[in-house]
Image (cartoon, rainbow, N blue to C red):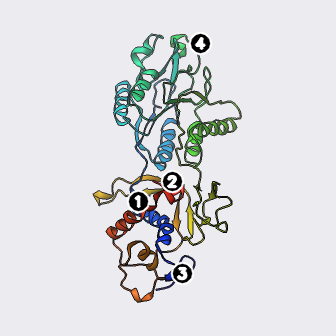
C-alpha cells in the first residue's frame, strides 16, 4: 500500500508524547463515525397559504409556500403545510403545530394570504370567511395572537412568526374600514415577529417577500436578524421601494443561525507547541482559519484540513424503511486528518494494530479496522489528553 510522508514520522519518533499529540486525529476519527447522526435538534415549520378567496382571490400564496418549503427543508426543518384552509382547518393546523413545536430548537410559522387589523388586533382570513361588519372578524377569522399563544406555549428555544399578509383588505368596503395592513404586535420572550411590509401599509401579490426570505435563510453565516434585514433590503429593491418589510419585535436572546455559522474553524494552539509550528504566532493567541486550509497542532502533529460547515440530504424515500424520510442535515465546521491514520499512529495509542499488511511498516495506513476498533481507539486516546487538545475539537 502507498506511503504518505506528509503525515508520517519514522517509527522511533512514536512515543507516549506523540500519542497525546495524535489524540486530535483520534477525536476527528470519532467525529467521522458519529457526525452522520448529529443532525440539528428538532426544527419545525408550519406554512399556510390561502389564495382561493371568493372576494379578491390571490395568486402567489401557494407559490410562496412552495419556495419556503424547499428552503426550510434544506436547512433541516420538518415542514407541515396547509393550503386554502377554512377556519377550522387553520385552527387545527395551528393547534397541531403547537404540539409539534414543543421543546423544539426553532419553530417557524409562515402565513401568506389576506390579513387585516381591527381594534388593534390582527386577523388572518381563512378560506370561506363571511365578513359583513368588523365584529365578524372575531367569529369568522383567526386572531394572530391566538396563533402566537399556541407557539409560545410549546416553549421552543426560538419562535419565529412571519406574516406575509399585508395585502389590501377584501372586506374593507363591507365593513367600511379605513385601516390598512396589519398592526404591530408584541413578541413574548423567545419570539420574533416579522411582517412583509411596514405596519399600516399594504403590499402587492408578487411574492417578493417569500422569494427573498427563502434565499436568505439558506445562506450560511447569517444570524437570524441579519437574515431578515437582508430580506428587507432585497424586497425593497425588487419592489422599487414600494414594499418595506419590518421586524416588529425580537425577544430571542440567543444567536440563531438557520443555515449554520460561517465556514471557519477556531483553533487554540497547544501550549507545548514550538514557535516554528504552523499555527502558533504566540502561545495565547486564537487563530481563525479559513475552510480548506491545512493546519497543525504542533510541529510533529498530523496535518489537518479545515472542513467548512454545510448541509446534505440524508436518507431517501425509496423502498428501505430505515432510510426514510429524506431530510437535510447541517454539519458545523471541523478539522479532519489530511491522510489516513497510519499503523505507527495506531500503535502509539493502542500498543499494537490490527493490520493484515503489517510488514508494510509504520508509514502505511492502518487497515482491517472495525467500528468497534475505532471506538476503542477514541475511548483510549481521549480521556488522558482531552485538556491538551485544541478548543475546536473538545466535545
| Residue 58 position (above or below residue 303) | above
Residue 94 on image: x %, y %: 38, 30
For the image, the number of numbered tags is 4
Is residue 27 left or right of 265 when viewed as pictured?
left
Nearer to us in this view, 311 or 122 = 311
| Residue 98 position (above or below residue 300) | above
Residue 21 on image: x %, y %: 51, 67
Contact flag, marks 4 and 3 (Cβ < 8 Å): no
Q: Secondary structure at mark 3?
A: loop
Q: Secondary structure at mark 4?
A: loop
Task: Give the labeled residue for mark 3.
Answer: 4
Task: Give the labeled residue for mark 4.
Answer: 178
Nearer to us in this view, 331 or 390 = 390
What residue appears at the point 62 percent right and 25 percent down from the top-left corner? Answer: 198
Q: Nearer the viewer, mark 4 or mark 1?
A: 1
For the residues labelled 4 and 1, the Cα–Cα distance comes to 69 Å
Q: Nearer the viewer, mark 2 or mark 3?
A: 3
Q: Does label 3 or label 1 sit earlier along the sequence? A: 3
What residue appears at the point 45 percent right and 10 percent down from the top-left corner? Answer: 135
Q: Does label 2 or label 1 sit earlier along the sequence? A: 2
Task: Give the labeled residue for mark 1.
Answer: 383
Q: Does label 4 or label 2 sit earlier along the sequence? A: 4
Nearer to us in this view, 36 or 311 = 36
Contact flag, marks 4 and 2 (Cβ < 8 Å): no
Q: Is residue 376 visible?
A: yes
Q: Nearer the viewer, mark 4 or mark 2?
A: 2
Task: Give the labeled residue for mark 2.
Answer: 332
| Residue 231 position (above or below residue 39) | above
For the residues labelled 4 and 3, the Cα–Cα distance comes to 76 Å
Amino acid at each position: 500500500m502507498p506511503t504518505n510522508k506528509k503525515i508520517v514520522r519514522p517509527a522511533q519518533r512514536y512515543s507516549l508524547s506523540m500519542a497525546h499529540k495524535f489524540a486530535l486525529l483520534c477525536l476527528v476519527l470519532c467525529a467521522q463515525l458519529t457526525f452522520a447522526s448529529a443532525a440539528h435538534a428538532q426544527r419545525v415549520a408550519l406554512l399556510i397559504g390561502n389564495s382561493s378567496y371568493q372576494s379578491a382571490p390571490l395568486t402567489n400564496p401557494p407559490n410562496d409556500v412552495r419556495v419556503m418549503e424547499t428552503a426550510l427543508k434544506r436547512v433541516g426543518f420538518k415542514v407541515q403545510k396547509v393550503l386554502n384552509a377554512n377556519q377550522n382547518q387553520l385552527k387545527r393546523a395551528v393547534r397541531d403545530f403547537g404540539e409539534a413545536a414543543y421543546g423544539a430548537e426553532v419553530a417557524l410559522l409562515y402565513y401568506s394570504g389576506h390579513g387585516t387589523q381591527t381594534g388593534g388586533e390582527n386577523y388572518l382570513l381563512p378560506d370561506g370567511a363571511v365578513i359583513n361588519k368588523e365584529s365578524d372578524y372575531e367569529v369568522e377569522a383567526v386572531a394572530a395572537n391566538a396563533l402566537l399563544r399556541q407557539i409560545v406555549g410549546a416553549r421552543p428555544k426560538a419562535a419565529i412568526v412571519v406574516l406575509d399578509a399585508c395585502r389590501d383588505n377584501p372586506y374593507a368596503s363591507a365593513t367600511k374600514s379605513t385601516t390598512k395592513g396589519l398592526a404591530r404586535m408584541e413578541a413574548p420572550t423567545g419570539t420574533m415577529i416579522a411582517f412583509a411590509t411596514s405596519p399600516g401599509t399594504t403590499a402587492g401579490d408578487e411574492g417578493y417577500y417569500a422569494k427573498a426570505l427563502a434565499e436568505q435563510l439558506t445562506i450560511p453565516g447569517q444570524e437570524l436578524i441579519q437574515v431578515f434585514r437582508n430580506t428587507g433590503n432585497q424586497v425593497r429593491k425588487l419592489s422599487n421601494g414600494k414594499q418595506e418589510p419590518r421586524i416588529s419585535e425580537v425577544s430571542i436572546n440567543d444567536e440563531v443561525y438557520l443555515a449554520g455559522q460561517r465556514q471557519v474553524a477556531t483553533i487554540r494552539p497547544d501550549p507545548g507547541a514550538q514557535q516554528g509550528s504552523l499555527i502558533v504566532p504566540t502561545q495565547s493567541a486564537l487563530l481563525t482559519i479559513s475552510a480548506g486550509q491545512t493546519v497543525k497542532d504542533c510541529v510533529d502533529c498530523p496535518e489537518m484540513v479545515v472542513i467548512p460547515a454545510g448541509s446534505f440530504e440524508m436518507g431517501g424515500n425509496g423502498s428501505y424503511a430505515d432510510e426514510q424520510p429524506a431530510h437535510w442535515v447541517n454539519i458545523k465546521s471541523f478539522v479532519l486528518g489530511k491522510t489516513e491514520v497510519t499503523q505507527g499512529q495506531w500503535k502509539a495509542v493502542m500498543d499494537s494494530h490490527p493490520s493484515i499488511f503489517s510488514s508494510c511498516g509504520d508509514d502505511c495506513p492502518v487497515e482491517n479496522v472495525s467500528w468497534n476498533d475505532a471506538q476503542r481507539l477514541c475511548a483510549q486516546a481521549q480521556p488522558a489528553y482531552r485538556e491538551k487538545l485544541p478548543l475546536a475539537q473538545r466535545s
